[in-house]
Amino acid sequence: MKFILVNGRTPFRNSTCALCGESISNSYLREMGTQLYYCDQSCYADHCKRVVDLSNNTRAAVVAVAPKRMKKASEAELMLTT
């Protein structure tokens, strides 16, 4: 993930941290892809950790479902060929 570290400046609008909800002060992080604000490096790091955990859980769910779908497709193909 790419981000900008801003020091000595507040956002144009009154903003809050995307993770903890704290008011953004004169030092913050802004993620480039989503344009979200984070109050400090620890909130941004926690956000990144949660994203990685979520993607790992999604991969695990896809792997768990994939064999079942493949088996159903194979059974359907067998019925069509007989």
Image: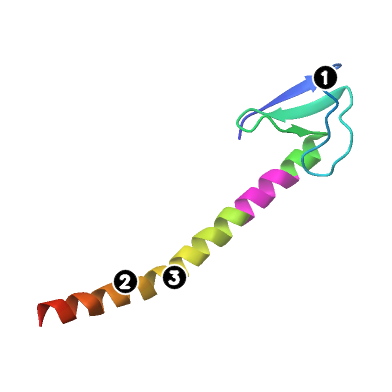
Q: Which mark is residue 70?
A: 2
Q: Please, what secondary structure does the residue beneath circle 3 have? A: helix
Q: Residue at x 74, y 46 (%)?
A: 46
| Disc 2 residue type (three-letter) | Met
Q: Earlier in the sequence, mark 2 or mark 1?
A: 1
The answer to whether 8 appears left or right of 81 in the picture is: right
Label 2 sits on a secondary structure element that is: helix
Circles 1 and 3, Cβ within 8 Å, touching? The answer is no
Q: Nearer the viewer, residue 20 or 42?
A: 20
Residue 32: image quadrant is top right
Q: Are marks 2 and 1 in contact (CB under 8 Å)?
A: no
Crowding at mark 2 (Cα within 10 Å: few <14, some 14-19, many 20+)? few
Q: Which residue is mark 3?
A: 65
| Residue 78 part of the magenta segment | no
Q: In x, y percent, where is residue 44?
A: 74, 39
The N terminus is located in which quarter? Answer: top right
Task: Tell me which residue sits at (81%, 18%) in the image.
Answer: 12
Which numbered disc flags the more N-terminal residue, 3 or 2?
A: 3
Q: In the image, which residues are magenta?
A: 46-53
Magenta segment, prevailing SS (helix, strand or loop): helix
Name the residue rendered at 54%, 59% in the picture.
Answer: 58
From the image, tell me which residue sits under label 1.
7
Looking at the rendered structure, the secondary structure element under dot 1 is strand
Task: Determine the residue positioned at 51% across, 65% down.
Answer: 60
Question: How far across and down, in percent of the image, does residue 76 sit?
Answer: 23, 77
- Mark number, residue 61: none
Residue 17, given in percent of the width and then of the height, sits at 81, 37
At label 3, which amino acid type do we have? Answer: Val
Q: Which amino acid type corresponds to the residue marked 1 in the rendered image?
A: Asn
User: Callout 3: 10 Å neighbours few (<14), some, many (20+)?
Assistant: few
Colouring scheme applied when the structure was drawn: rainbow
Relative placement, left or right, of 68 versus 82 is right
